[in-house]
Amino acid sequence: MSEVKLAAESRTEFGKGAARRIRRENKVPGVLYGHGSDPLHLTLPGHELLLALRTPNVLISLDIDGKTNELAIPKAVQRDPLKGFLEHVDLLLVKRGEKVTVEVPVHAEGELAPGGNLLEHVLTALPVEAEATHIPEAVTVSVEGLEAGASVHAKDITLPSGVTLAVDEDAVVLQVLQAQAEETAGEAAEGEEAAEA
């Protein structure tokens, strides 16, 4: 689990105008909340935050105004739908040793059984509970040799030590779909004649 240090400034200006001014300076408005404390409005460095958010569930060590240090994980990220730049970020305050519920990306590895079958990701991310400082970056599932109709349930996935499922253990994570056979020209013609009749 990577920990990224970011310098943050507390902010007192709110609204669209203030947010635009912050973004013009290549910074991102954000809010830090959790543990029953009042939300703390922050200004974060844009480029460094963008790099940090490339890691799912990254642990961010915030140096706020050079006075206090807080640990946080990203909870909600708003991006510009066209340009993709960061517009706002919600951060959840966490403590070392505390358990948090997060979604961890699911990666499949291996080859399916021959036959051109398709692998469907029913869940692209698996909800788990883990210690805030030991959140896995992803979980890997072997699909080696799986045939059409086979599925992988949450309970079938091996999780790192200290990580538990935060979803029904019978939830389907991956399933193998049978490849659709292409219609032959004769079958297509028969279908058209039946439709005309």
Image (cartoon, helix red, strand yellow):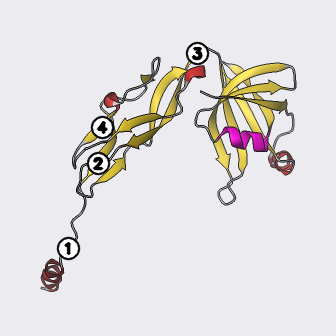
| 11 relative to 37, above or below | below
Marked residue nearer the N-terminal end (4 or 1): 4
**Disc 3/disc 2 C-alpha distance (Å):** 39 Å
* Nearer to me, 7 or 142: 142
What's the residue type where badge 1 is placed?
Answer: Glu
Is residue 52 in the magenta section? yes
- The quadrant in which the N terminus is found is top right
Circle on res. 112: 2
Label 3: state its secondary structure: loop
Sort mark 4 into few (<14), some (14-19) or many (20+) by Cα contacts within 10 Å: many
Question: Residue at position x 55%, y 26% from top?
Answer: 135
Mark 3 vs mark 2: in front: 2
Please state the horizontal and vertical placement of residue 11, each as a whole percent of the image.
Answer: 85, 34
What's the residue type where badge 3 is placed?
Answer: Glu
First to last magenta residue range: 45-53
Q: Name the side, left or right, on which 188 lies relative to 80.
A: left
Badge 3 is on which residue?
98
Badge 4 is on which residue?
152
What's the residue type where badge 2 is placed?
Answer: Leu
Q: Disc 4 vs disc 1: Cβ atoms closer than 8 Å? A: no
Badge 1 is on which residue?
183
Sort mark 1 into few (<14), some (14-19) or many (20+) by Cα contacts within 10 Å: few
| 112 relative to 10, above or below | below
Please state the horizontal and vertical placement of residue 111, each as a whole percent of the image.
Answer: 32, 47
Please state the horizontal and vertical placement of residue 20, each as a whole percent of the image.
Answer: 83, 50
Q: Disc 1 vs disc 2: Cβ atoms closer than 8 Å? A: no
Q: Disc 3 vs disc 2: Cβ atoms closer than 8 Å? A: no
Mark 1 vs mark 2: in front: 2
Residue 169 visible in image: no
What's the residue type where badge 4 is placed?
Answer: Val
